[in-house]
Amino acid sequence: MRNRFFADKPHVPGHAVSSGHCVACGRQAERNACVCPYCGERVWRPWLWHAARCGVLLLPPALLVGAAFRLTAEPGWHALFSRLRAAPPAAIWLAASALGLLALPADTDGSVAGTDGDLRRQQVEALLGGAAQALYTVTGAVLLAAAPRPSLPVLLLAVPLFAGAAFLPFFLRIPRPRPAAAAALAAAAAASIL
Ligand SMILES: [Zn+2]
């Protein structure tokens, strides 16, 4: 007779769990998900992925602090705001459209996440991820635009900030149009300062 207890057990993949698959049920998780949407277990990723994720999540906030010090020294917040206040109407329109795009909820219709909590976490991740991406890109653009001439410290802050923004969608569930919105916002900020 067939043993019903063992027949009902989920497929256990053994040692060969490939990246992005659940450690318990072996099914492929959604893009950048850390928890299996089917059974709630951990999704396996190589240590390099975790190390890169830590770097992308922790390094840009430290760079933002450096950028804030840099902008305080040159050109100073007062000068920066007065230049931003004199922004051309096209830049204001571009920034407003980009902010609208950033505030749009993520499309979760195709998600297999079952609970409202999971869907809410996805929306929060999309919103905060998109906001962080925009903040890094705008800060990098403002640094480059406000500097009287491109210097090494400015490049060492701005380039990793752009890289951090570019790599965020590989580690967080950020919807596709958000990077475009971040780039538009950065372009608007740079156009206002230059
Ligand atoms: Zn699973």
Image (tube, rainbow, N blue to C red):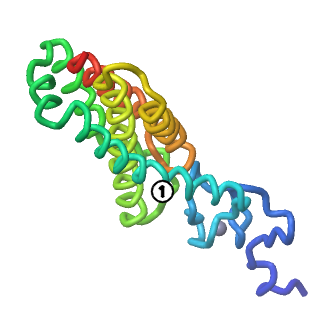
| Dot 1: element | helix
Which quarter shows the C terminus? Answer: top left
Taking 54 as reference, is 149 left or right?
left
Q: Residue at x 43, y 45 (%)?
A: 109
Q: Residue at x 25, y 39 (%)?
A: 73
Q: Quadrant of ligand 1?
A: bottom right
Q: Residue at x 79, y 84 (%)?
A: 4
Q: Position of residue 189 (x, y in %)?
A: 25, 25
Q: Is mark 1 within 8 Å of ligand 1?
A: no
Count the marks: how many? 1
Q: Amino acid at mark 1?
A: Leu
Q: Nearer the viewer, residue 153 or 118?
A: 153
Q: Residue at x 30, y 45 (%)?
A: 69
Q: Nearer the viewer, residue 121 or 129?
A: 129
Q: Nearer the viewer, residue 135 or 64?
A: 64
Which quarter shows the N terminus? Answer: bottom right
Taking 126 as reference, is 75 left or right?
left
Taking 69 as reference, is 41 left or right?
right
Q: Position of residue 49 (x, y in %)?
A: 67, 55
Q: Quadrant of residue 124?
A: bottom left
Q: Quadrant of residue 36?
A: bottom right
Which residue has dot 1 on it?
A: 58
Q: Position of residue 93 (x, y in %)?
A: 17, 18
Specify few, some or many for label 1: CA neighbours under 10 Å numbering under 14, 14-19, or 20 or more. few
Tell me if residue 144 comes above or below residue 8 in the rendering.
above
